Amino acid sequence: MRKKPSLPDKKGYFNEFGGKFVPETLMCALSELESELRDAFKDKKFLRELDYYLKEYAGRPTPLYFAEHLTKKLGGAKIYLKREDLAHTGAHKINNTLGQALLAKRMGKHRLIAETGAGQHGVATATVAAMFGFTCDIYMGTEDITRQALNVYRMKLMGARVVPVDSGSRTLKDATNEAIRDWVTNVKDTHYVLGSVVGPHPYPFMVREFQSVIGKEARAQILKAEGALPDFLVACVGGGSNSIGLFHPFFNDKKVKFIGVEAAGKGLNSKHHAATLLKGEIGVLHGSKSYLLQNTDGQVNIAHSISAGLDYPGVGPEHSYYKKTGRAKYEAVTDRDALRGFRLLSESEGIIPAMEPSHAIHYVSKFAAKLSRKKVIILCLSGRGDKDIDIAKEYIKL
Amino acid sequence: MNRIDILFRDLKKRRRKALIVYIAAGDPGISATERFIHELEGCGVDLIELGIPFSDPLADGPTIQRASERALSKGVNIRTILAMVRRARKKAGLPIVFMTYYNLVLHYGIKKFISNAKNAGADGIIIPDLPPEEGSTLIEESRKKDFAAIFLAAPTSTKERLRAIANKTSGFLYYVSLTGTTGARARLPGEVAKKVKAIKRLTKKPVCVGFGISGPEQAGKISRSSDGVIVGRAVIKVIEKNLGKSDLHKKVISFVKSLERAVH
């Protein structure tokens, strides 16, 4: 048996990162969630139910596809794609929302709220709300409502209300502020379905546990396909849920190297990027201590990325812990190069990726070429690209 | 004894309640804030809560969010605010406590912040996103400087939590009258009174009530069951309505006087 990593500790810390930095009103809700989670993870019926929905409703396990054509084209390491784009709703977000919806049901909550950037988490929340019969409000920045119009329509179609957020940068950060404000106000009957491994404890832990299905499946699948563990895991990092989901089950496999790819936006030396781990300093935003993009006064900077899902100035505390301890390495890819990755996978494999994993694809396209053919990379293809077609059309003329 | 402890001791002797007014430092400008401090004291305000604006004020409703944005657009920061408090302190005798979010203090340095704030003439700090279990450094450093680290309790706080908060807070205990952000509609005064009574059984420290107090009538009612009331949004509304007008300060003074009459 592999030893299970014991972090976070009881107070929700991954060494110095994490914690619970929220208004007092929410402290009881967090304790309630913590104890419910503890019970649920011991409850065979809950775990069976979650498995059932993951399999029958979300379509898991998702394939681990050997990208033969891409591999040949690059001429280096073997590249496998973990096909989260094939999960129901088109991204890995459903793994988490199914888990949290089942928990909300156990807690007797009637209403779900969520923040969303790219709209994938909003769609995944609206989906489970429709299926389980919750009322549902999704907070979304007006900037993102414009650039992810397709997902807005999908959410509305499933009966969710999309609440436009017009403050600050009008993106994911501000949508999260507004969702927290709603939760503070309606905490008694509402469960806040946070979409990433961010926020106060137990969210980073809970979301990691629900997303770890990605890495657990991938680990079994690669052992079957290759008879060995992979050399590298690569995934994009905004808040960091698809990457933690892939990385975490390999935590104790010390030979497996983790690479997280952040959004370099218009360049790491410009002010327009979302590379929190590479360029941020330690701070507190949205309930936890982690790296944070901030100015010299400690005001939170506005992030920028072509992909709404990576456009966030914070990052999950477990990633900060991985960075500080060296367990993972972090790189960044610009908007322009992400578009190259987007096009590369579309052309070489007939798979249109979301703009978020396109960052990781571009990184792998440079990295794999330098490696020997014996090396194996698993890349988390966290979502499909339909939602990004309008943006792609602006930049890629055909 | 610091200014806050002296204030509540005196109020108790005189059987009076504290009127606490919140303003955002730098709204609509740093010199206007300095002037407000003196004007509020002149109106009989007992304690000023001075907001240090943060980019992501997640415990605040829309009115105080807008005040923070206005202040940030004027370029205020901890340094300029401390300098202003130092100037104001030459004349002002009332206690001044800061209200801000944890990241600003963490980034500035907790120890350095408390030391510089105390030197400038401030008396305490309220951080709505810092529950007492995360506040051990703040509590320790504050204690060394006789600076008040004021913690908040909420309607959802359990009895155990109320006890812990009452135990850790200094200066006074800030009871949040509702589940919600600043400026939302307050609960019925009866409910608040019941809760405050329960807290007062747990502690001898003063208990003041804030969040959602809409005007003089409510302030008067809620002050009866507590040791003081905190009014923020209602005052900011008056500032906001009169931005750029020559009688801005006159309007604020007249509103605060109406609060004063209801509470004292």
Image (tube, rainbow, N blue to C red):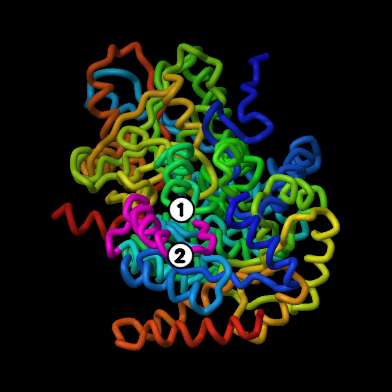
Q: Residues within 10 Å of mark 2 (few under 14, many from 20)?
A: some
The first of marks 2 and 1 along the sequence is 2
Q: Residue at x 43, y 38 (%)?
A: B112
Callout 1 amino acid: Gly
User: Magenta includes B89?
Assistant: yes
Q: Residue at x 57, y 33 (%)?
A: A212
Which residue is tagged 1?
A: B121
Q: Which residues are magenta?
A: B73-99
- Across and down, in percent, residue A372 comes to 28, 12
* Label 1: element kind: loop
The quadrant where residue A366 appears: top left
Q: Is residue B34 above or below residue B140?
A: below
- Across and down, in percent, residue B113 comes to 44, 43
- Residue sitting nearer the eye, A312 or A348: A312
Q: Residues within 10 Å of mark 1 (few under 14, many from 20)?
A: many
Left or right of B210 on screen, residue A16? left
Residue A60 shows up from this direction: no
The quadrant where residue A332 appears: top left
Q: Is residue A203 above or below residue A158?
A: above
The quadrant where residue A315 appears: top left
Which residue is tagged 2?
A: B92
